[in-house]
Amino acid sequence: MASSTPDSNIECNEITLTSEFSQNELKKQVSAYEDEKSRTAPPEENQEVPSTYPGLVECAPFPALGSLNEITLTLSKTQTNRTNTDGISYADSIATAIQEEPSKGESSSAIGDPYWTEGWRNPGWLAVIATFLVNFTIFGTVFSWGNFQKLYLRDVYAGQTDSFKIAFVGTSANAMLLSMGLFISPFLRRLGFRGTMVIGTVLAPLGLVLASFATELWQVYLSQGILFGLGGAFVFSPSITLPSQWFVKNRALATGIAVSGSGVGGVCLSPMSQSLIATIGYRNTLRTMGGMGFGLLCVATTLAVSRYPPPSDKKSGGSPLRLFERSLFTWPFNFVLVFSILVPFGYVAPFFLTPTYASVIGASDSMGSSLVSIMSAANVLCRITLGYVGDRYGRVNVIFIFTLLSGIFTMIVWQFADTFNVFVVYCVLFGLTGGGFVSLLPPVIAEIVGIEKIQQGISVSYFLTMFGNLLGTPISGLLQSQFGWTAAIQFPGAMTVGAAIAMLVARLLVNPNIFKKV
């Protein structure tokens, strides 16, 4: 450091950073200068206001190896050492920068501002992994329910139930883990994200373990259905919002990777559970899946890093039991909620009806099951790819276009799929378009309601999907039995197109320019 000598009117100070200069030396020089300044006469007023420069010494892990030219250009400034209009000198500003300037890894920006990097150094990728593990464990277990349903219906509880009643074990778990997020908001405000996830980490595997000891059907409903679904909600609802906190440019891509865990979990856990049932029995299978799920959820909870804390009780209206703010319900968000009500009716039914329709057109049972696997694999690719496309061309634009395409494919391609080959084409097209809303809906809600309200927005939206998840397949099955396949096909297609229209209205309310990236 070299400092200029004062002349008759202006006293200048020049700071030059060299490779031998450390942060502690800078502090000592500032302190010595302050002592000297206190013995001099008060400076004159109305001088040029000095600039404040960031504490680059703190930002660089190895200052001597940093870009000396850039740092010197920033810190080597000749400034008048007169006090500014607020009474803060240039040396005061340097001292403040040293003490208060955060490093790159710290978040000092307002809520919703981009993190300093969206590359591999972004801690949000840990949240993406955590959300992936949650989706893998929870939804993978839900998708494997069909293996237990056949066993319960044929052997364990034969004569005590039928296919319609026993199906509510699986559907109740799926509906609860999506819809109960609305009622978990008070826990989030009190316990935080990880504290809330700890509850689900215990409850969800506990439901499977308790089901392994069940001797009555009602015990299966309570354990494998309600308790597992409730525990799943406690881990799924907090984790699904975390990737959106860390990413702006790649928000939909990060969310798409995270939610693709559900498809991967279905592909992995369903055949695994079937193999375990055949070798060690269904009771030990439930215990094994419970233990494995507990381990995976522990890892997920550990990796679930949040950038912002949940909204406080004061920001939520002052009541710790308040579920959402009234200001949340703007007109664009209201149409997003209409979308959330309609889209599950068209998304769930094709997966459940595909094996039955395949047998109608002459395919074997194994070929029908393979079509579901094809749809699931295409769905995983869809969630990741559309997340990337949404980041480039607008998430609201992409969710509208691909939801509309999904409905059109159902209403036209499936309707005229009289041969197995044409039906395979439909399964691939539906898989590549139908699941886009799963990865795009959280980023869309973040854009419409703001990142500070994303937890409430997603909770309300997912709560409304409960109706489609519970009733979509039964309604389509009832239409098929009463009016034939045309009604069963056109109903989910029409609901999907209606959801796309609702999203279009929301998009036009946000920005009426149809060529704008939204």
Image (cartoon, rainbow, N blue to C red):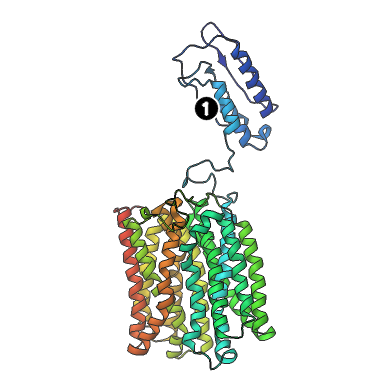
Q: Amino acid at mark 1?
A: Thr
Q: Position of residue 345 (x, y in %)?
A: 39, 74
In which quadrant will I find the C terminus?
bottom left
Residue 21 visible (yes or no): no
Q: Quadrant of residue 23?
A: top right
Foreground pick, 73 / 325:
325
At x 48%, y 66%, the residue is: 180
Q: Position of residue 105 (x, y in %)?
A: 59, 43
At x 38%, y 58%, the residue is: 396
At x 46%, y 68%, the residue is: 179
Asked if residue 158 is positioned above or below residue 508 in the image, the reply reads below
Query: Please, which residue is most extreme toward the bottom here?
Result: 159
Q: Position of residue 188 (x, y in %)?
A: 52, 57
Foreground pick, 407 / 259:
259
In which quadrant will I find the N terminus?
top right
Q: Is residue 2 left or right of residue 315?
A: right
The residue identified by callout 1 is 52
